[in-house]
Structures are given as C-alpha cells and as structure tokens.
Amino acid sequence: MTIRGAIEEGEATLARAGVATARLEGELLLEHVLDVPRLRLILRGSETIGDAALRDFRIITARRATRIPLQHLVGWAPFLGHRIVSTRDALVPRPETEQLALLAIDRLRRVEAPRPRRVLDIGTGTGCITIAIASEVPDAECVAVELSPDAATLARINLGRANLGRRVELVEGDAFEILKTLGRRFDCIVTNPPYIASAEIEGLDPEVRDHDPRLALDGGTDGLDFHRRLAVEARGWLEPGGWLLAEFGDGQAAALSEMFARAGWIEISVEKDLSLRERVLIVRAPPRGNG
C-alpha cells in the first residue's frame, strides 16, 4: 500500500469513529509510525509502505478510533514550540492554553522590579505553562503547584526534558493551603483550573470525558468553584498591582467579571482564544494603598 493509500484508509477509519479531524490525525499517526515529518509524507504519497509499518499504523489507528487521545498515543503534545509528554495523569495541553501562557508572558515582561520577576502556576498539570513562561522569561522565578501526585510526577518529567528542573520550584499539594505558608508574593499568577460544570462532564467528547483527569475538569455545580476561591484569596498572594490570569469555559465571562469586581480586583478584562471564544480572564490586584 502507498503512503497516500494508508492515509486515506486511516482517515476513513477515524471518520467512522467520529473523529472530527480524521485526515490530519491519520497523517500525524503515520508520521509517528514512520518517524517521517508529515509534510514529507504528503510529498512522498506514491511511495510504498512496508508490511510491518502498515500493520503498526493500522493498530494505532484502531486505538485512536476508540477515542484515546492522539497525544496519548504518540506520547506528546506540542505547546509553544515544546514537546510536552502527555498521559492521562494530566490535561492534554491545548491551543487555548497556549493563549493563556502568551498573555501571562506579556504581563510578566511588563513588570519592573529590582529583583527577579516571580510567577506562580496553580494546577500546573503537565507543566506546559510554566515551561513556556520560564523559557520566554529567563530571569523569572517560577513556582508551580500541583495537587495530584501523578500529575506532579509528569510535570517533573517535562521540566527535566526542558532543562528547567532547577529553575522551577515544583510544589505538591493544595495551592490554597500551601500559599498560606509559602511566605512570598508574586508578580503574576496563571492558572488553567477546573471549570466544567459537574453535570456537563458526561456530555464532553470521549477524549476529554474518559481520559482527562476528573480532578482537572470538575469545577462544581456551575464550574466556578475554583475561581470563587481565587477571587477571594489570590490577592493576598500577589504584589500590589500584580496580575492574575485564569482560563475559563464558554458562557462564564460575565459571571467571572462580576465576581472579581465584587472582590475588589481592578482592570478586569477578557481575552478570546484563536477560535474567538472568550477564554482568559485577566484581573489586577489594586496598587499599594488601594483596596
């Protein structure tokens, strides 16, 4: 069978299983099996695939058809130029969260202080946000907090692969308890917290519902339990004028803006992701002497 024929066969298998990006994922799975860049495969479409490689491609395509995430099958996910090891121990890094990281990098670069800039990543998961920030802001002091021991282990692996294990302080445990005793304030807090309403989880795509950790998804009755605690407590962890950036779900922007305004935050704004959905809340702690 030719490369083109294998891709078309894989596309058909994945399309029948309900995978929305069947053609692209067929190409990516064959890229993984053959260890040949996807665009080169397309250019070499008339070449023949060996029997062993074709067998391996059919096996991995069949597994993807059961709705195991592509990133779990190939073992990694792209995130702002980094290859992030991805397993079911943490959320798969997604393009929406790349936008969150870029916005945090921008705010952190604006900080002027006679010391290294400090950033806190709450619920670091794979560590992808911290890795992106630490890579782009080399003088930043980064602290990443993760409640799940399994996710913390995964983050430690990714930090090591990025040669950031010594630059990033990874702390295991409940952020709200840890930060009471950490004894420092930050210039920027960034978080991709759980924000799916509990009753909506069963209706999610199988890749998310069955393979992402529920701890990282379930935000309570309306999805905003974690954000409520942030609104009340996070100002105490920031330097005056410091930034908090938090990802959120569809339809939550108005409630979040009102929630943080009531809690005394200033400069409240919402940024859209690449699909033009409101996705990132940006708020600021009042300057010294205010609020």
Image (cartoon, grey):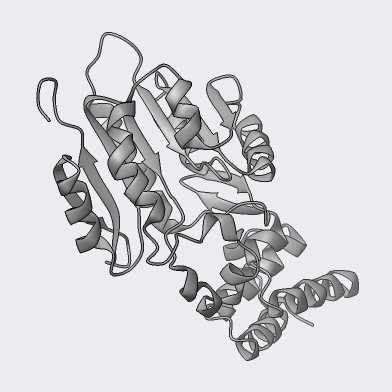
Q: Position of residue 92 (x, y in %)?
A: 57, 56
Residues 37 and 92: in front is: 92
- Identify the residue shown where x is 61% and y is 25%: 165
Residue farthest to the right? 52
**Residue 252, x across and y down, in percent:** 28, 64
Q: Quadrant of the C terminus?
A: top left
Q: Using the image, determine if residue 271 lies above or below residue 142.
A: below
Above or below residue 270? Residue 186 is above
- Image coordinates for residue 13, horizontal then vertical, percent: 69, 86
Indicate left or right for 246 with 212 as reference.
left
Residue sitting nearer the eye, 237 or 133: 237
Rendered residue at 58%/35% (across/down): 173
Is residue 124 placed above or below 92 in the rendered structure?
A: above
User: Quick check: can you spot residue 200?
Assistant: yes
Quadrant showing the N terminus: bottom right
The answer to whether residue 53 is left or right of residue 221 is right
Q: Residue at x 52, y 81 (%)?
A: 20
11 and 211: which is toward the camera: 211
